[in-house]
Amino acid sequence: MSRKNRTPEEKARREKIRELLQMANIGSMGDIQILFKETIVECLEDSLEAEMDDELGYSKYDYKNKDTDNS
């Protein structure tokens, strides 16, 4: 079976993933699961904070630019 032809972007992304796994000292499937959970949590927290900033009209702790009573 031949290998799928990958675009340069896909190859670069796969290389970054390999680097991340090596930096995180991944040694088992449990380590991968923990890394995956941490990544999902971080992504969700960042997304929710961005949504809150957009809804309120100012970012967290940025009271100087608070032009609304919504808090």
Image: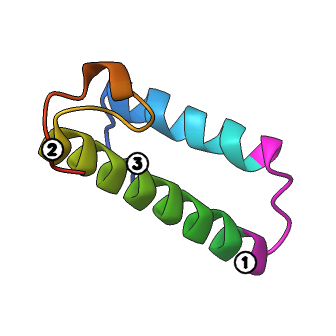
Residue 54 image offset from top left, x and y in percent: 17, 40
Q: Report how many numbered discs are placed on residues in the image.
A: 3
Within the magenta stretch, is there residue 25? Answer: yes
User: Relative to residue 36, is residue 64 depicted above or below?
Assistant: above
User: Regarding mark 2 in the picture, which secondary structure is present there?
Assistant: loop
Label 2 sits on residue: 69
Magenta segment boundaries in residue numbering = 22-31
Q: Is residue 44 left or right of residue 71?
A: right
Tag 3: amino acid:
Asp
| Mark sitting earlier along the chain (2/1) | 1
Residue wearing tag 1: 29
Mark 3 vs 2, N-terminal side: 3
* Residue drawn at x 35%, y 49% as measured from the top left: 49
Please tell me how crowded label 1 is: few (under 14), some (14-19), or many (20+) other residues with Cα within 10 Å. Answer: few
Left or right: residue 5 versus residue 20 is left
- Position of 47 with respect to 14 (left or right) is left
| Mark 2 or 1, closer to the camera | 2
